[in-house]
Image: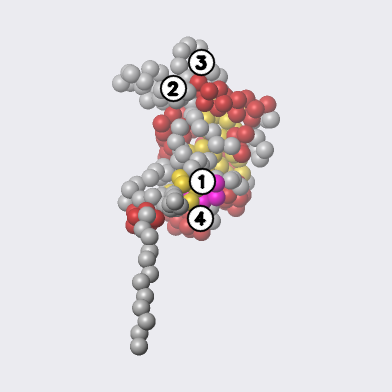
Amino acid sequence: MLKKTVLELGGSDPYLVLEDADLEQAAVLCARGRLLNMGQSCIAAKRFIVVDKVRSRFEELFVERMSAAKFGDPLSDQTELGPLARHDLRDALHDQVQRSVAMGARCLLGGKIPDGRGAYYPPTVLTDIEKGMPAYEEELFGPVAAVIPVKDEDAAIAVANDSVFGLGGAVLTRDRERGERIARERIESGSVFVNEVVRSDVRLPFGGVKESGYGREGGVEGLQEYTVVKNVSHLTK
């Protein structure tokens, strides 16, 4: 029997850091979005598309925030970041990092498997990411951030949309109207947040476009996905 389906699949969410962004706030939001559940989330921030004018300062603040996260034993109350789910996932993530570096990416933080037991991987920041690198093309399912430099807003939007994924995204700018216009009209994603971390909410429709799936869960639209419309008609004399 055929049944209706809703598919919420993977993502490689872009966070656009524009030249007028509050960089202190941007660094906090980007680190929080990247390290959510150790980066093992479909809507975790993954690609950080930064306008050249503010790139150097953003990277400095971002690395500071990423390195400040308390990393260690998941049973400790002080720990913010624990291990990844499995060793093979950790090894696959490290392979993506190594291949990106071999192709010209620079590692600003992390990038090395720590000694000891557990599928641990440190918060990692890669920069100088370019098209063709694994960190540009593939989903990084772990605490690895890919910083992609661009010259301006139009270039940032082009890079954001240059992906097979389209689940979530964010625009960071002091100009709220500008951010909302970009989010509404120009980013190819099911959800786009302005100056916030992407998240799902049962009150709002959530889902993706392109290879991030189809259909929506949450909100009225989510209820309608599981509603079958029936047409009853009769002839009139």
Please, is residue 115 above or below residue 63 in the view?
above
* Residue 84 visible, this orientation: yes
Mark 3 or mark 4, whichever is nearer to me:
3
Question: Which secondary structure is most common in the magenta stretch?
Answer: helix
CA gap between label 3 and label 2 equals 11 Å
Q: Can you identify the residue that label 2 sits on?
A: 83
SS at mark 3 in the image: loop
SS at mark 2 in the image: loop
Furthest-top residue in view? Answer: 116
Type of amino acid under label 3 = Pro
Tell me if 126 is positioned left or right of 66 in this view.
right
Of the image marks 3 and 2, the number of the one nearer the N terminus: 2
CA gap between label 1 and label 4 equals 20 Å
CA gap between label 2 and label 4 equals 36 Å
Q: Nearer the viewer, residue 229 or 153?
A: 229
Mark 2 or mark 1, whichever is nearer to me:
1
Mark 1 or mark 4, whichever is nearer to me:
1
Mark 2 or mark 4, whichever is nearer to me:
2
For residue 182, the mark is: 4
- Residue at (46, 45) in percent of width and height: 8
Asked if the residue at tag 4 contacts the one at tag 1, i.e. Cβ–Cβ closer than 8 Å, the answer is no
Q: Which residues are magenta?
A: 208-212
Type of amino acid under label 4 = Ile
Asked if the residue at tag 4 contacts the one at tag 3, i.e. Cβ–Cβ closer than 8 Å, the answer is no
- Residue at (54, 33) in percent of width and height: 140
Asked if the residue at tag 4 contacts the one at tag 2, i.e. Cβ–Cβ closer than 8 Å, the answer is no
